C-alpha cells in the first residue's frame, strides 16, 4: 500500500468526521441553540439540521415540554401574626429557548426562589382564616405575580398550586375548640328556632280549630233558628188554615184541631216531672163525645144564622184510674 492509498483513506475518514460534525438531529420536545465562535446564531427545531462543522457548535439543549417544580416547605407569618407552614408545586414551560438559555443562569433555581419569595409575600398579606379558606385566590395571585416576573426568561408559568397549609398544633387545637363552640351555638339556635316554630304552629292550629268550632256553632245556631222559624211558620199556617176552616163552618177541622191540642196536652201532663197522679178518660167514646160537644158549640157560634137546637153530647162517665206513685220506690 502506497502513499496514495493512505491519502485516500485519510480523506474518507475526514469526510466522515465532517459529515458527523455538520449533521445534527434534534429530538421532539427539545430545542437546541447554535453558537458560532461562542455567539448565539439560531435555534434548531426537532428533526435533521445542518450546521457549519468546526465553526458552529451546539450551545444549550432546552426542554420545551411542560415541567413540574416542587417547592419545598417554608414558614410563613400571616397578617395576624400566625405562623404556618406551606408547600407548593409550580408548572412551567419554555417558550423561547434562546432567552431561557442566555437570559438567566440555572433556570429551575431561579423559578424556585421566585416562587418561594412570592408565596411568603402573598400569604403574609392575608389573615389566617382568609388564608385557610381562599386557596384559589392565593393560587391565582401567585400565578399572576410569578408569571409576570419570569416572562423575560422566555418561559410561561402555567400553574402554581398550594399543596398544604399547616398551622401549629396549638393553633389547630384552638381552631377545633372554636369550631366546636360555633357548632354547638348553631345547634342551640336551630333548636330554639324549631321550638319557636313548633309553638307557632300549635298556636295556629288551635286558632284554626277555635275558628272552625265557632263557625260550626254559628252554622248550627243558624240552622236551629231557621228550623224554629220554619216550625213557627208551619204552626202559624196551620193555625190560619184551621181559623179559616172554623170561619167557614168546617166541623171536622175544628174536631181535628181540638183533638190535636187535647192529645198534646195529655202528653205534656203525662211527661211532667212534678205530676204524681194523672186523671184522664180512658174510653175513646168519651173523648169522641167530648169532641162532638165542642163541635156543636162551635157550630152554634160560627153557624150561618139558622137557629138549630143544640144537641147535647151524651154525658160521659169519667173513669178514674188508680193513682200510681211517680217514684217506683213507693208502695202501691
Image (spheres, helix red, strand yellow):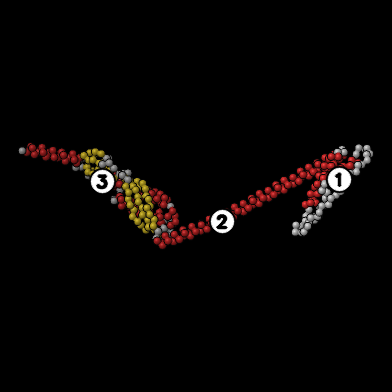
Pointer 1: what residue?
290
Q: Give me the C-alpha separation between circle 1 and circle 3.
A: 147 Å
Q: Bin the neighbour count of mark 1 within 10 Å (Cα to Cα): few under 14, some 14-19, many 20 and up.
A: some
Q: Is residue 152 left or right of residue 314?
A: left
Give the foreground label among 2 and 1: 1
Can residue 22 be seen here? The reply is yes
Q: Nearer the viewer, residue 130 or 279?
A: 279
Question: Distance between the Cα atoms at labels 2 and 3?
Answer: 76 Å
Q: The residue tagged with tag 2: helix, strand or loop?
A: helix
- Which image quadrant is residue 256 in? top right
Are there few (<14), some (14-19), or many (20+) residues within 10 Å of tag 3? some
Left or right: where 257 falls relative to 120: right
Q: Position of residue 75 (x, y in %)?
A: 37, 58
Position of the N terminus by quadrant: top left
Q: Nearer the viewer, residue 303 or 219?
A: 303
Q: Identify the residue at the far left of this view.
A: 1
Looking at the image, tell me whether mark 2 or mark 3 is earlier in sequence order.
3
Q: Which residue is mark 3?
A: 60
Point 8% across, 37% down: residue: 5
Indicate the secondary structure of the residue bearing disc 1: helix
Number of other residues with Cα within 10 Å of mark 2, as a class: few under 14, some 14 to 19, many 20 or more: few
Residue at position x 76%, y 43% in the image: 230
Q: Which residue is mark 2?
A: 195
Residue drawn at the location 81% of the way across and 49% of the way down:
266
Amino acid at each position: 500500500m502506497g502513499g496514495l492509498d493512505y491519502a485516500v483513506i485519510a480523506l474518507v475518514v475526514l469526510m466522515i468526521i465532517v459529515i458527523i460534525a455538520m449533521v445534527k438531529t434534534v429530538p421532539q420536545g427539545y430545542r437546541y441553540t447554535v453558537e458560532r465562535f461562542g455567539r448565539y446564531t439560531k435555534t434548531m427545531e426537532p428533526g435533521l439540521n445542518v450546521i457549519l462543522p468546526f465553526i458552529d457548535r451546539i450551545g444549550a439543549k432546552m426542554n420545551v415540554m411542560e415541567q413540574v417544580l416542587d417547592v419545598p416547605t417554608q414558614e410563613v407569618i400571616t397578617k395576624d401574626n400566625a405562623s404556618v407552614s406551606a408547600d407548593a408545586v409550580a408548572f412551567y414551560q419554555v417558550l423561547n429557548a434562546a432567552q431561557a438559555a442566555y437570559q438567566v443562569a440555572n433556570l429551575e433555581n431561579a423559578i424556585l426562589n421566585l416562587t418561594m419569595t412570592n408565596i411568603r409575600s402573598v400569604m403574609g398579606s392575608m389573615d389566617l382564616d382568609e388564608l385557610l379558606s381562599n386557596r384559589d385566590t392565593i393560587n391565582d395571585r401567585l400565578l399572576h405575580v410569578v408569571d409576570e416576573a419570569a416572562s423575560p426568561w422566555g418561559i410561561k408559568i402555567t400553574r402554581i398550586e398550594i399543596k398544604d397549609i399547616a398551622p401549629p398544633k396549638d393553633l389547630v387545637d384552638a381552631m377545633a375548640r372554636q369550631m366546636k363552640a360555633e357548632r354547638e351555638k348553631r345547634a342551640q339556635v336551630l333548636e330554639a328556632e324549631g321550638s319557636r316554630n313548633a309553638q307557632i304552629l300549635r298556636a295556629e292550629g288551635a286558632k284554626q280549630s277555635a275558628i272552625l268550632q265557632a263557625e260550626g256553632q254559628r252554622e248550627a245556631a243558624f240552622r236551629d233558628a231557621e228550623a224554629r222559624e220554619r216550625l213557627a211558620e208551619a204552626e202559624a199556617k196551620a193555625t190560619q188554615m184551621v181559623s179559616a176552616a172554623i170561619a167557614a163552618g168546617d166541623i171536622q177541622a175544628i174536631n181535628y184541631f181540638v183533638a190535636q191540642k187535647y192529645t198534646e196536652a195529655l202528653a205534656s201532663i203525662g211527661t211532667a216531672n212534678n205530676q204524681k197522679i194523672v186523671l184522664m178518660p180512658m174510653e175513646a167514646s168519651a173523648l169522641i163525645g167530648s169532641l162532638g160537644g165542642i163541635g156543636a158549640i162551635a157550630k152554634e157560634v160560627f153557624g150561618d144564622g139558622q137557629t138549630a137546637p143544640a144537641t147535647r153530647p151524651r154525658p160521659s162517665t169519667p173513669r178514674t184510674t188508680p193513682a200510681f206513685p211517680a217514684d217506683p220506690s213507693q208502695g202501691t
